[in-house]
Amino acid sequence: GFFPVKLKWQAWLPLLAFAALCASPAFLPPPLPEERQLSEEERGQALAQKNAIADEAKAVEQVKALAPKEKSEAEALQQSLRDLSDKMAKLSTPKDMLDALVKRAREAEKLADKIEDELSLSLSEKMISEMERHADLANMASAARAKDMGQAASALSALGKRLENEMPLEEKERLKEAIKKTLEASSEKDKQSAVGQALAKALEHLEKGRQKNAARELSEKAQKLSEAEKRGAAKRQLRSLAERLRSSGQKILSQKQQGVNRLSKNSNLQSVGSKA
């Protein structure tokens, strides 16, 4: 049979030495950028961000007009940010830090996505132009053109307050005519909008001599628009929070590296890692 050629034991020494050299740390591949240890400068930056993240947790308390389930999720996000603030000093690699920040940013974005825009100020040009022709509806037209929910709420509220008190017949007829002309210029979509519905209901009450009911209808719709404006603000606050969390990583890392790209919204990050 075939047997390997027998070599003297001294002949194996070069091979053994080479194997030992290859196994030494000097020959091991360097760690990936995300897996290296944070530098002292970066650790200092991370500690500096600790208070900023604690402030972000407090800022979540200012997010208003949330539904009960949304409020519960906002409280969970707030606690998650507190936990991150407490553990910033324990994060040892860029990957740990980026994963922790991205995780919270995504939690904020997920909550923002759940806040639906239930009301809209997307009125047709024809309807807005008609309102602009009438002094009684000029403020409402300005709000609609600017798509300013808060301004629209104020305009409807002011109109409702005017109707709470008796007004001269001429003024009342002028207002009825302004609303009627506006509704005639409105599309079906306009009539289904919050403003269209409020004006239609108010006109119906006015034509039947129920001025107080018209005032109540406008005031109630103004309140709904105000709530919608607050929910829109909450959505914007949460998205802004997510952006600030993502940018925190760039502030902490002392040099550009591939891992920072994971902070991008369009990143292909597959996992946010374990809970920090």
Image (tube, rainbow, N blue to C red):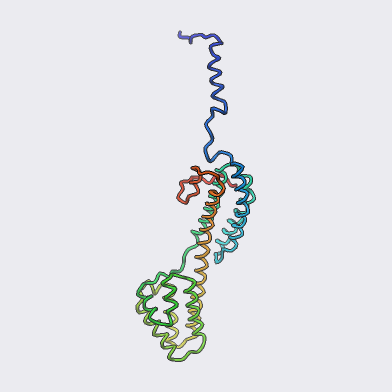
Residue occupying the point 44% across, 77% down: 140
Q: Quadrant of the N terminus?
A: top left
Label total for image: 0
Q: Is residue 9 left or right of residue 188?
A: right
Residue 7 in the image: above or below residue 262: above
Q: Is residue 82 left or right of residue 115?
A: right
Image location of residue 105, percent across then percent down? 53, 53
Image location of residue 33, percent across then percent down? 52, 39
Residue occupying the point 49% across, 85% down: 163
Q: Is residue 182 left or right of residue 213?
A: left
Image location of residue 79, percent across then percent down? 61, 55
Image location of residue 143, percent across then percent down? 44, 73
Q: Quadrant of residue 132?
A: bottom left
Residue occupying the point 55% across, 49% down: 251
Residue 87 in the image: above or below residue 157: above
Residue occupying the point 45% across, 78% down: 139
Query: Which residue is at the front of the view, 183 or 31?
Result: 31
Q: Quadrant of residue 25?
A: top right
